[in-house]
Amino acid sequence: MTAGPADDRVRVTIAVDVPVEVAFDVFTRETELWWRRGPRYRNAGDAPGTLAFEPRAGGRLFEEYASAAGRQVHVIGTITTWAPPHRLAFTWRARNFAPGEVTEVAVEFAPTRRGTRVTVEHRGWATIRADHPARHGQAAAAFLANLGRWWGDLLRPLQDRGPGPHFPK
């Protein structure tokens, strides 16, 4: 994880032992297999629901789930770059963001000798006010360090998945 020059970004890199095309496909089309559940990672917490990318520029990253109030759909972001199998970018809006508040996530898939290096960069935090609830009262450096750990924890199941029915050799 690294912070950018304006202290508004984090970067997390993992390695997966599959070709780039498979890594991109699992990341974007089989998100339910690796994106963690629970209140740290999903609005639905541990409740049943679906988190999915619509596979196209202009598509959504959204979470759909049932609640006491009925079916809920939270649009996390809009896909700004859809360039399989090497690049994906999307806007990111936390549930407590006001209209116009947005950050960006860029994901790169690069071939390596053993598989694929997946790099996630979440940037644009300098545009979100210092006292925003999404920052949990933390100074910029502490917030970004925790955000980097959050992305690292989120991506661990993708890294640990290894070869199998959805990650063939």
Image (cartoon, rainbow, N blue to C red):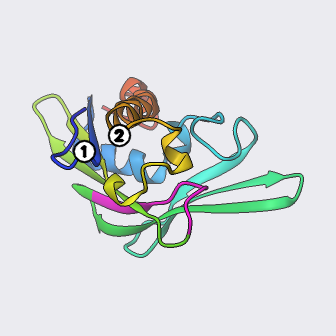
Q: Image point 65% across, 33% down: which residue? A: 38
The x, y position of residue 135, in whole percent, is 48, 43
> Percent x, y for residue 81?
30, 68
Label number found at residue 40: none
- As helix, strand or loop, the secondary structure at mark 2 comes to helix
Q: Residue at x 40, y 46 (%)?
A: 27
Give neighbour class at mark 1: few <14, some 14-19, many 20+ (Cα, 10 Å). some
Q: The magenta stretch spans which residues? A: 88-98
Q: Looking at the rendering, in which quadrant would you find the N terminus?
A: top left
| The magenta stretch spans residue 92 | yes
Label 2 belongs to which residue?
140
- Whether tag 1 and tag 2 are in contact, CB under 8 A, the answer is yes
At label 2, the amino acid type is Ala
The residue nearer to you, when weighing 168 against 131, is: 131
- Give coordinates of residue 162: x percent, y percent: 37, 26
Kindly tell me whether residue 120 is visible in this rendering.
Answer: no
Assess whether residue 120 is covered by the magenta stretch.
no
Which corner quadrant holds the C terminus? top left
Snapshot quadrant of residue 45: top right
Position of 145 compared to 70: left or right?
left
Residue 140 visible? The answer is yes
Residue ID at (36%, 28%): 159
Is residue 155 shown above or below 27?
above
- The residue that disc 1 covers is 7
Q: Residue furthest right?
A: 68
Tell whether 51 sits left or right of 7: right
Relative image position of residue 22 (x, y in whole percent): 32, 45
- Furthest-bottom residue in this view: 58
At x 10%, y 31%, the residue is 113
